[in-house]
Image (cartoon, rainbow, N blue to C red):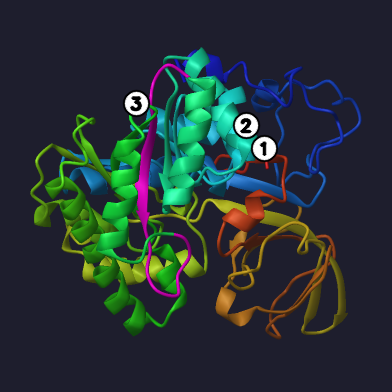
Amino acid sequence: MSGEAEITKLGTGPTGRLTGLEKGLPCPGNDALDLSSIADAGWNLLRGDLPLPVCTLRRKALEHNSKRMLRFLEAFAPNIVLCPHGKTTMSPQLFQRQLADGCWGISLATFHQVRAARRLGFDRIFYASELVGLQEIVFVLQELAADPAFDFYCLVDSIDGVERLRASAEEFSPGRPLQVLVEGGFPGGRCGVRTVESAVDVAQAVQASSPHLRLVGVEGYEGVLQTRSKKEGLAAVPAFLHSLTEMIRACDREGLFSACEKIILSAGGSSFYDLVAEMPRHLQLSKPLQVVIRSGCYLTHDSGLYRRLFEDLRQRSDIAQQTDLSFDQALEVWGHVLSIPEPDRIVVGVGQRDFGHDAGPPAVTKASRDGALPRLLDAERYEIVIINDQHTTIRGPADHGLKIGDTVAMSPSHPCTTFDKWRLIYEIDESYNVVGAIETFF
């Protein structure tokens, strides 16, 4: 983005206005409401100004999480930058917040996401995948030709993939090389070369494709290893990261980074970024190293998967403790209590159309009545037993005290699969006043 002023021009679609049909938008009279005017509407979540269910973000938590993450990384080395995975939120307003706080760029995972980010004006994009389809390749090449400010990176893990990029770049000639990184993988994992020798072979193919392609680094994604047991994951992650350092050393010894000013090493999802941040201590290369970390979920945190993983990180990282690294849950989905058909059975009007539960059910965290500030609930005492499309059935304690019409907050686990359920998400202050809104483009 060229400046903060431009983000205020962004709206929903080409007109910059809401359609009036967005889930959670009050009616009537809001068919032509501008997104930027929501902050001045005077709405309050608890007062009943919004139709439920709605999804909200606590602004104070967003600000806290964004600044704490960057402060943590700054404690390691100046050559470590954060390029958050935008696929988590796909929100231009949140992208701009992250960039304004000091992030290096935005990581993305699909062609649609890249196209949306370009349409919305974002310049530095790290495409954390292989670019193989003709439509996708040509779009990127045309953007490179049209906009000198467009700074794009993508991955390769095969000579065939290199050849597809080279052939298209030669035909469509954007006037400058496409920047690529060799992706490293591990046996049984996702994409990525499995050996140092294969990494060098692919890197040599990139170098041979000059001036159409330029090798700028090595990339890997260790986050899929968090699906293994804690003990197994903690052993596998350092081994995988070591393999990436061996790949980058081998490519450097062969002189394969001769065309770039800095060598990029990129990894770091939302589980083990502390271990990635330690990697520069073990690398001596022929050119300056830049470590690009791609965590996405830190901004909103969660109540389940990443809360548990973060507790592990805090225990193993001295720097996390020294910098007092902490994250607050920012994302909540609110619904009404619709029915209490049995004393311990509470049915709330939110469901899997409103929150993700691929990493476990959300936590039941708050309840409010008649506009009062919410009381905190002990999530351990509220068990979600059924999740339907629009309903969630909860088994609560005998003294739950809930009544029909109360509003209840659910705090999701794994925020990625909740953001994509919402086109419009409200930002709220600590009094639950609506102080802004974000839009998503999934």
The residue at the point 12 percent across, 37 percent down is: 287
Q: Left of 127 or right of it: where is 42?
A: right
Can residue 285 be seen?
yes
Foreground pick, 230 / 300: 230
The span from disc 3 to disc 1 (Cα, nearest Å) is 34 Å
Question: Which residue is labeled 3 in the image?
Answer: 211
Q: Amino acid at mark 2?
A: Ala
The magenta segment: 174-191
Q: Quarter-wise, where is residue 382 in the image?
A: bottom right
Instruction: Kindly report which numbered mark, 3 or 1, lies closer to the viewer in this rendering.
Output: 3
Q: Are marks 2 and 1 in contact (CB under 8 Å)?
A: yes
The span from disc 2 to disc 3 (Cα, nearest Å) is 28 Å
Instruction: Kindly report which numbered mark, 2 or 3, lies closer to the viewer in this rendering.
Output: 3
Magenta residues, dominant SS class:
loop
Q: Secondary structure at mark 2?
A: helix
Q: Position of residue 162 (x, y in %)?
A: 43, 43
Tag shown at residue 116: 2
Residue 182 belongs to magenta span = yes
Q: Left of 362 or right of it: where is 352?
A: right
Q: Secondary structure at mark 3?
A: loop
Q: Position of residue 181 (x, y in %)?
A: 35, 44
